[in-house]
Image (cartoon, grey):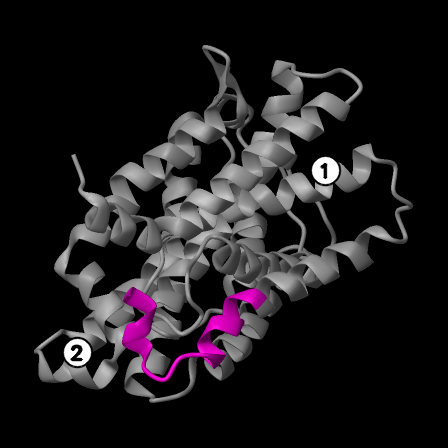
Amino acid sequence: MMNHEEFRFHFREKRGIYLSAVMFAVLFAVFIGKYQTGWSVAVVSTAANKGVLLALAAMAQTLPVLTSGIDLSVGMVFVLANCLASHLVTGTPMQAAFGVLAVLAVGCLCGLLNGVIIVYGRLQPIITTMATGSIFFGLALGLRPVPGGSVQEDLADAVTGVSAGIPNTLLLLAAVVAFIWIPYRRSIVGRGALAVGSSEGAAFMSGVPIDRAKLVAYVLSGFLAALGGLLLTFITYSGEASSIFGGTYTLMSIAAVVIGGTSLAGGTGSAVGSIFGAFLLRTIGDLLYVFDLEPLWQPLFQGVILLVAISLGSLKLLKLSNRLELFK
């Protein structure tokens, strides 16, 4: 059992996760209550699929942010993976499996490119990833000048299906948390990423492998973004090189990270909080639909929500005289 001080510290550290989880639960209950068919497997599965897509992008964004960086190419890696998968994840099950590995490998290479330029080129993450994002979109556009393609149907149905009333995409997300995020967070490199985000100078003096921590963060970011693009292909059975789509996912991923309690200054936060932030944002979008808000007004409200979310995440930084106050 935790004593009062331990609970107080634990809540301060995890409050972003708890608050976003509670808000998501409340808003999702309102959505289900207002939706004309109420609770059903089809409704929950559709909501889960949309939420998991953004959750993977948010997890991808979280890793660089923890190192006090940012990845503006997340959405474009997402789109590139979607277009590439619509070419490669076809044919026999064995061919489709190799296609999946190839798509994820390309995502890792995209992240590695970002990391190498940032670490060894000494360029700012925001400039680097903005530039590489344009490159990734150009590759996606070359692969899919017009929407189209296909995907191995049996594999797609298995990934997007339902098992024991639970959408398989949620099980996939849980597996990503269990086998990627948790081991990473507990590893030396994962702890090093938090140290780098808190104070790179202090981390260097403490012997933290700064370069490796940043490289791994960006490689995993590319991997998770590619996994999201791959999942999109399974859901839509096609690929599309859309700059609007990629840009939206990038901005929404940043908002989800902030709502989930991760500081844009780096050094504190969790991918789990970003997941709840992503589901919360998706639920808000669904609520705008079920309350029959005019379609022309929906982007305005979503833009205001994004602005407020990012502003709240930055507001605390204005009050800090020392970044260590984030941990008090």
Task: Specify the quadrant of the image occupied by residue 70.
Answer: bottom left
**282 left or right of 226?**
right
When the figure is inspected, residue 204 is found, relative to residue 304, above or below; the finding is: below
Q: Is residue 11 above or below residue 292?
A: below
Which label was assigned to residue 286?
A: 1
Drawn side of residue 233 relative to residue 324, left or right? right
Give the number of marks. Answer: 2
Disc 2 marks a residue whose amino acid type is: Ala
Identify the residue shown where x is 51% and y is 38%.
Answer: 22
Mark 1 secondary-structure assignment: helix
Magenta residues, start to end: 312-328
Q: Is residue 288 visible?
A: yes
Q: Magenta segment, principal secondary structure?
A: helix
Mark 2 = which residue? 203
Which is more toward the observer, 140 or 168? 168
Residue 261 place in picture, x, y as percent: 44, 57
